[in-house]
Amino acid sequence: MRVTSSITDEPFGTLSDGTVVRRYMLTSSSGIAARILTYGGIVQELWAPDAHGNTVNVTLGFATLDEYVRTGNSPYFGAVIGRVANRIARGRFTLDGVTYCLPVNQPPNSLHGGTIGFDKHVWEVVAAETLLDGALLTMRLLSPSGDQGYPGNLEAEVTYTLAGDELCIGFTATTDAPTVVNLTSHPYWNLAGEGAGAIDDHVLTLHAGRYTPVDATLIPTGEIAAVAGTPFDFTKPATIGSRIRDPSSVQLRHARGYDHNFVLDDDRSTTTPVPAAHLWEPTSGRTIDVYTDQPGIQLYSGNFLDGTLRGTSGRLYRQGAGLALEPQRFPDAPNQPSFPSTALRPGEAYTAKSSFRFGTDT
């Protein structure tokens, strides 16, 4: 039976300064539904059917605004990440001969935009529309010059388009002074269902024959290494759990699992997203295909979840309760000239497009 596409919203809570946070529900013609918050642009829930038509939430998150605020959403569940996703070494970078200092919120580095990144702001809704087969939600954030140490007034927008079986996430940004930008979205997926346990049996394929090894603080060394013969080879389907505890891998020990950037194959200069990853959970049959125009994708296997956080289902999230696949430019790119640039200058437009296509495969 065809489902009528729609978009609705409701209050989700109020911050201590009186700002009301709203929750939007986007529903597509295929019955997939996403709940998205104006706080942090967070994808709080994503409901998708399995091979038998049973629909459950497949992304990690909290049930209340208070939990996001009180915990600082330290795992960044479902949030927009900016100005610069991932890590910047020692919380500093130099652009056009000027050195900028950032908050060191994951010592000794700056992580995901700093102490108060884009994930901790309330975004302004500028469009909320029903489409023929889904719905669209666009939100805007103005990040003033000096915000978390970054130069330039940056105007950023994120657009969520849920249509048919696909959630598309598009970013744009402009600046009035030279700066650096690397925006992404940080959903954690568990295709067996949110709170269903570890994702060790999820089968992953990555269109990436190379990755960027990291040091003990999870900063890329600058090397771009082949995945062949390592636990990072997902060029052919492999379960997450099959090699994640390989005692011989220094890289896995550094991160306590996977927390690495993969260098995507093919030409990523196109404005049309191309295949990056395929994820399959065999019990439910659910799948996600990730498409992006970005040069890298971060695989994070939920290594630092420790059983202290309770999700929307009421269950505790233990290590490996979900995995993130984050399309991006490379970590620490402002400090690594050999990596694709994150510099943005006046008159230029930053864009990034990714999509998550849901399906089933038995």
Image (tube, grey):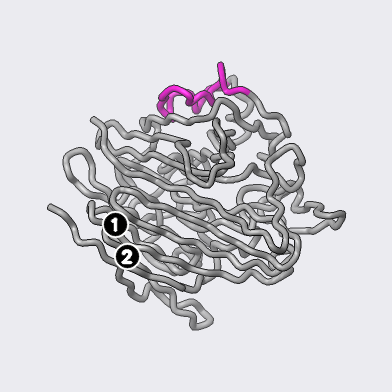
Marks 1 & 2, CB-CB < 8 Å contact: yes
Q: Picture coordinates of residue 177 (x, y %)?
A: 75, 65
Graded by Cα atoms within 10 Å as few (under 14), some (14 to 19) or many (20 or more), the crowding at tag 1 reads many
- Residue at the right extreme, as displayed: 97
> Mark 2 belongs to which amino acid?
Met
Taking 76 as reference, is 123 above or below it?
below
- Which residue lies at the image location 28% right of the left edge and 51% below the top edge? 164
Q: Main secondary structure of the magenta part?
A: loop
Magenta segment boundaries in residue numbering: 226-247
> Mark 1 belongs to which amino acid?
Ala
User: Which sits in the foreground, 343 or 236?
Assistant: 343
SS state under label 1: strand
- Residue indicated by mark 1: 33
The first of marks 1 and 2 along the sequence is 2
- Which residue lies at the image location 26% right of the left edge and 37% below the top edge? 360
Q: Picture coordinates of residue 5 (x, y %)?
A: 24, 61
Q: Picture coordinates of residue 314 (x, y %)?
A: 32, 56
User: Which sits in the foreground, 184 or 4?
Assistant: 4
Q: Picture coordinates of residue 94 (x, y %)?
A: 81, 52
- Residue at the left extreme, as displayed: 1
SS state under label 2: strand
Q: In which quadrant will I find the C terminus? A: top left
User: Which sits in the foreground, 60 or 71?
Assistant: 60
Find residue 232 and report its image quarter: top right
- Residue indicated by mark 2: 25
Taking 114 as reference, is 330 above or below it?
above
- Residue at the bottom extreme, as displayed: 18
- Which residue lies at the image location 84% right of the left edge and 56% below the top edge? 99
Give the Cα separation between the discs numbered 1 and 2: 7 Å
Find residue 263 and report its image quarter: top right
Q: Is residue 25 magenta?
A: no
